[in-house]
Image (cartoon, helix red, strand yellow):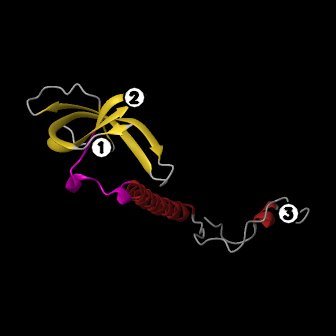
Amino acid sequence: MAEDTKTYRKLTATSCDVLRQGRNKDTGREWTMYEVYAVDEAGSPVEAKLRAFDALPLNELVEYAVTRRDDPRHGTSYTLELPKNRRPAKKDTGFKVQIDTLKLQVANLEQRTEWLLGLIHELQSAAGVELSTAPPTSGPQSAATAAPGAAPSAALGQGPIPV
């Protein structure tokens, strides 16, 4: 695959769709190749096959580094690169999104737990029953392991029911 030197060209990306994704077998890093449609400064559509390895800003005139690629299987294409000051940080993109998603999920679960505990306490007050919200000190005894002939309450243990 022959690769020419980079040139610089101002283009406006009008579409940037995921074409392929994979993992670099040498570094283990994930990559995404985007198929790009763009117009030049005059607004004329670029007819060449364009691609990028970063999601590009849409409908914004940007000066891209353009590298020609000649491939026997895929033909000639041009890879667009964002200027260095506009590129996303490679290290942060994957894990940061996952961590932020997990933080939101944990906060949601904490809210739901608080709501459920409040509901349990309301039901306890209405029924005149006191239930413990402390974690059990030992696992519940099943009816199968209770003494033969014992009442069901003996199999569940005496005292407050852990929630």
| Residue 89 among those drawn in magenta | yes
The answer to if 60 sits in the magenta stretch is no
Image quarter of residue 134: bottom right
- Looking at marks 1 and 3 on the same chain, the residue that comes earlier in the sequence is marked by 1
Q: From the top left corner, tell me how far across and down residue 147 is, in percent.
A: 89, 66
Q: Earlier in the sequence, mark 1 or mark 2?
A: 1
- The magenta span reads 79-93
Note whether 42 is above or below 102 in the view shown.
above
Q: Earlier in the sequence, mark 3 or mark 2?
A: 2
Q: Residues within 10 Å of mark 2 (few under 14, many from 20)?
A: few
Residue 101 horizontal/vertical position (percent): 41, 55
- Identify the residue position indicated by label 3 in the image: 145
Q: Amino acid at mark 3?
A: Thr
Q: Nearer the viewer, residue 98 or 111?
A: 98
Q: Which residue is mark 2?
A: 74
Query: In the rendered image, which quarter contains the C terminus?
Result: bottom right
Left or right of residue 120, residue 90 in this image? left
**How far apart are the alpha carbons under marks 1 and 3?**
60 Å
Q: CA distance from mark 3 to mark 2?
A: 68 Å
Residue 55, which numbered label? 1
Among all residues in the image, which is located at the extreme bottom? 137
C-alpha span from label 1 to label 2: 21 Å
Q: Is residue 111 above or below residue 43?
A: below
Q: Residue at x 73, y 68 (%)?
A: 139
Instruction: Say which of marks 1 and 3 sits in front.
Output: 1
Residue type marked 2: His
Whether tag 1 and tag 2 are in contact, CB under 8 A, the answer is no
